[in-house]
Image (spheres, rainbow, N blue to C red):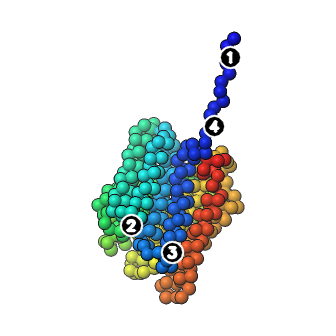
Amino acid sequence: MISWSSAPPKKRTWIEKFISQPHQIFFMASIFWAIFIMSLSFAIYLGKINASFNLLHGFGLMSGVFLNAFLGFLITVIPRYSSSTSIKPKYYTAIWVGYQLAILATLFLDETLGKAFFALMLLFTAILFAFTLYKANNKTQFETLLLIGLFIIASFNILININNNTSLLWSILWLLLLPITFVVAQRMVPSFYGVYLQQTYEQVPKSLVTIAIWLFVIIGFAQELYYVKLFSVASLALLTAYILYKLPIYHKAPPILWILTVGFSWLPIGLMVMFFEVLLNANTLLLAQHILLIGYILTLLIGFGTRVILGHSGQQIIADSYTTSLFTLTQVILLVRILASIGFLGNLSFTVYLLHMGFVLWIILFIAWGLKHFKTILGKN
């Protein structure tokens, strides 16, 4: 007599679940670096540790927090953008390991070697995205092509300016973080509204997106060119304000959507502040960059990250009161940082206390965000 019984499928370990989706490993790294780097930054600021504040605080947060988070998001959505097959775990896990090693090497081992490795990882990411696009049904997918180009440009520029710390931070911000956030936001935010309103959304004209990306790149290369930088920042501020004005995103909507709208709106505001900083040669403790990083990028990451985590774990895609509180805390951190810059310009004594408060609130924010999604990110749900 023949038995047709079969063994039950092997149950996956939590480690296998953890690495099964790219956003999980990259988001976890982002949360770790956010708490670790800001804690070290605070210690350096208080004089407890002797280390380069600009390198650790600037490069550490930009690469460890923001870039990790966006890599997790992009590796997840680019195959969907271009109707391609999902990127295999062995590839994105290799990227994940490489990025963390590059960050560690740059901050704590050999800065030059670490930067070179970091630049090569950017290039490897571009190659992986290009290969994903090659296998796609839509081989001319506009946003994916832009993202590939940005990763390549940033990679080579970092290699060329490997011994210039200021150029490194400026390059990562203007050639990578700001434009890739813009590429994603101008596509995804109106799309999410279109789904919610059950109507076709109107995409931003490709010509305007292309002009905006070129302006980001020009600013990235024009760090020491006063008039070029001034004109480009002003032009980009006006262009992004116009794009935001034309987007169909001003409707009554749940928090998961208006969080994205608020985040996107900080882009032209930060650019306008940057314009006046350049025009007046004002030392504002990098106010514009903090508006762009905290108000624009971090707020959007909370919105995008929440959607990815909830959607890929089979949960309802909503921003509950906890998530809304995290969004509110992000805006409070930004407000504290704005007030600190105003206090610095006025040489007011409370500035130092506001900076201390900003450090602490940032750490609280990421601990709270990690606690909210810890089990889901680890694949334990």
320 w.r.t. 344: above or below: above
Vertical placement of residue 107 versus 11, above or below:
below
| Viewer-proximal residue among 78 and 101 | 101
Tag of residue 43: 3
Quickly name the residue at label 4: 11
Which image quadrant for residue 166? bottom left
Please give the residue where the numbered disc 2 appears in the rendered image. 170
Mark 3 in CB contact with mark 1 (< 8 angstroms): no
Circle 1: residue type = Ser
Query: What type is the residue that disc 2 sits on?
Result: Trp
Whole-number angstrom distance, CA of label 3 to CA of label 1? 67 Å
- Distance in Å between CA atoms under marks 4 and 3: 44 Å
- Tell me what residue is drawn at x 45 percent, y 43 percent: 91
Secondary structure at numbered mark 2: helix
Which amino acid type is marked by label 3? Ala
Q: Secondary structure at mark 4?
A: loop
Would you say 126 lies left or right of 345 here? left
Which image quadrant: the N terminus? top right
Callout 2: 10 Å neighbours few (<14), some, many (20+)?
many
Dot 3 or dot 1: first in sequence order is 1
Residue 243 visible in the shown view? no
Residue at 68 percent of width and 61 percent of height: 322
- The residue that disc 1 covers is 3
x and y percent of residue 149 in the render?
Answer: 37, 52
Residue at 42% across, 45% down:
129
Q: Is residue 51 left or right of residue 253?
A: left
Marks 4 and 2, how far apart at CA: 46 Å
**Res. 324 in view:** yes
- CA neighbours of label 4 inside 10 A, class few (<14), some (14 to 19), many (20+): few
Local secondary structure at mark 1: loop
Q: Is residue 8 left or right of residue 130?
A: right
Q: Nearer the viewer, residue 339 or 163?
A: 163
